[in-house]
Image (cartoon, grey):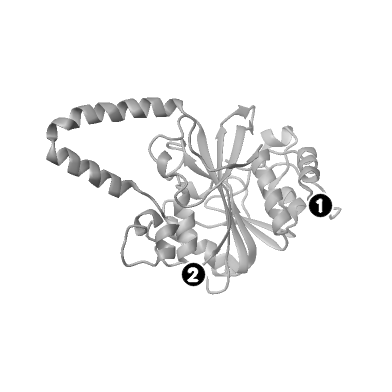
Amino acid sequence: MGVPIQVARLLLEESKARPFAGSLLTLGRTSVYVTEAELRRFARRHGVRLADDGGPIGLSHNPELAACGCLGDRSFFRLLGFSEVTSVDASNWEGADRIADLNRPLPEELRGRFDAVFEAGTIQHVFHLPNVFANLHAVLKPGGRAIHGMAPSHNHVDHGFHQFSPTLFHDYYAANGWRLESELLCEFTSLWLGSRFRPAGFTVRRYRPGCLDELAYGGFRARQLALFVVASKVEHATADVAPQQGYYRSFWSDVSERERTAGRGSGPSRRRSFDRLTARWPWIEPPLLGWKRLRRLVGRLRPRRLPPVTARY
């Protein structure tokens, strides 16, 4: 998916909270759908000072985007504050600096080298996700950040191998002791203008475990959903703990109260009450199903109960 202007603005906000510096590894060559003028305009709006080092500003490695004046990935990230930008990809079709498969451990010389890793819609194309997360951990310096710039979550069928629920990132990074800096839901309508990805109606909401319980089945309708997640590799962070989904841990008796409330939900207990009712009076099942269908139809006309909006881009 690359970096549309809305994701560039989220990166500016992240830079404002925790300034970028040092070395960056990008997973794949990053297509940037942003011109230099647009980036400078929004940097002023967000109160971020770009890192103008006097070097030449390069255009995109994609000739069609370059013709639109879109920034090259190295220039884009250099303006955000990184002094070194390295890309890794499974093939050389876009001119990556290093050729390596994220399904397997990355080369030893890349380990512990980077202050941040960025991907904007790359890891959904990698089959072996546990190895992806292990590689993120391996290449980052202590204190480094993993930034998922636009991980597809809903209505991206066959775009890649995976679509991601936000609980994946939350539960994985929490279980492995990382510090979650940002967990955002980005709801949008996908639009392309020529070669440029220009999503419309970009609505940003902060994710918290349990906030989507009522929307898990069909709650996002025809719009698309992507995730913006930032996690820091703090001291003692690991990569090999396989998480259990927080929603279900909230019902287990052998977890702490903190872990239980982290994945709150009410589904199983409510389903059991209906099961008991229909087992006692089987004749009530058809009218009950009819009533639930009617509620579902009416519910689709009502405003959805979503987390508060933090930004509209």
Residue 250 in the image: x percent, y percent? 37, 58
Whether residue 207 is visible: yes
The residue pinned by badge 2 equals: 238
Whether residue 103 is visible: no
On screen, residue 92 versus residue 159, left or right, reads right
Q: How crowded is mark 1: few (under 14 residues within 10 Å), some or many (20 or more)?
A: some
Instruction: Identify residue type, mark 1.
Output: Arg
Q: Is mark 2 on a helix, strand or loop?
A: loop
Image quadrant occupied by the C terminus: top right
Residue 277 in the image: x percent, y percent? 19, 40
On screen, residue 15 versus residue 112, left or right, reads right
| Front residue (pair 197, 62) | 197
Instruction: Identify residue type, mark 2.
Output: Thr
Say which label, 2 or 1, has the lower sequence index. 1
Residue 198 in the image: x percent, y percent? 64, 32
Image quadrant occupied by the N terminus: top right
Q: Measuring 78% from the left and 42% from the top, which residue is drawn there?
A: 45
Q: Residues within 10 Å of mark 2 (few under 14, many from 20)?
A: some
On screen, residue 115 versus residue 138, left or right, reads right
Q: Measuring 42% from the left and 39% from the top, which residue is drawn there?
A: 215
Q: Measuring 34% from the left and 55% from the top, which residue is drawn there?
A: 248
